[in-house]
Image: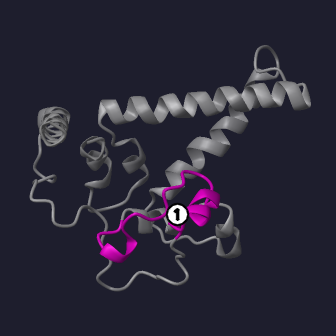
Amino acid sequence: FLWEFHKVHHAPSTMTPVTDYRLHPLDAFLVYSSSGLFAGAGALFADQVFGIRSIGQESSFVLAIFLVIVYLPATLHHSHRWWSWGVLEWVILSPACHTLHHSKDPKHYKSNYGLRLTIFDHLFGTFVSPSKHPPSEDFEVGLQGDSYDWERASLWQLLVDPIRKSVGHLLRIGKRSQ
């Protein structure tokens, strides 16, 4: 049922850096809450291991590192450029890897879930290499087979329809379990 909220992010037929921020508010809450937890863990790690305090003079350094590690890659991952990092993709997610994640092609479905690293995609068998799956002439991003008209949806529809559809999924699941 959470996919209904995340579809708002996957619906655009063109990748742009702004695509990273096209999120339903509930999806944004979940994404940024988890980012906040990781940032807090990173700040604690920096404090305990390197003695870099996230409060005071060093806080701007910690913030700069956080911005470089979190927001710059996210912006690059959603660019319209097919940038591949080559062998580094065994560890670091490239824009090409993430573009495959947004692909309409069924062979790319359920792949490259990582936000910054590809380690877990390798562990769980969900990594799809851009070098083995270069884009063809008819390569497209967006949602395949979804009858919803994402291009013409109003802001109100983008906010309300995912809630309505998710509640419908939950009610169907509830009926099956009875």
For residue 83, side relative to residue 155 (left or right): right
For residue 53, side relative to residue 88 (left or right): right
Magenta stretch: dominant SS? Answer: loop
Q: Residue flagged by tag 1: what amino acid is it?
A: Pro
Residue occupying the point 16% across, 66% down? 145
State which quadrant residue 36 falls in. Answer: top right
Residue 90: % across, % down: 67, 68
Residue occupying the point 49% across, 28% down? 33
Residue occupying the point 29% across, 47% down? 3
Residue 90 against residue 1 in the figure, above or below:
below
Residue 27: % across, % down: 35, 36
The segment highlighted magenta reads 103-127
Residue 83 against residue 17 in the figure, above or below:
below
Residue 41: % across, % down: 70, 29
Residue occupying the point 36% across, 67% down? 109
Residue 92: % across, % down: 65, 60
- Judging from the image, what secondary structure is the residue with disc 1 in? helix
Residue 47 against residue 82 in the figure, above or below:
above
For residue 143, side relative to residue 145 (left or right): right
The quarter of the image holding the N terminus is top left
Q: Which residue is mark 1?
A: 95
Residue furthest out toward the front = 178
Closer-to-camera residue (175/118): 175
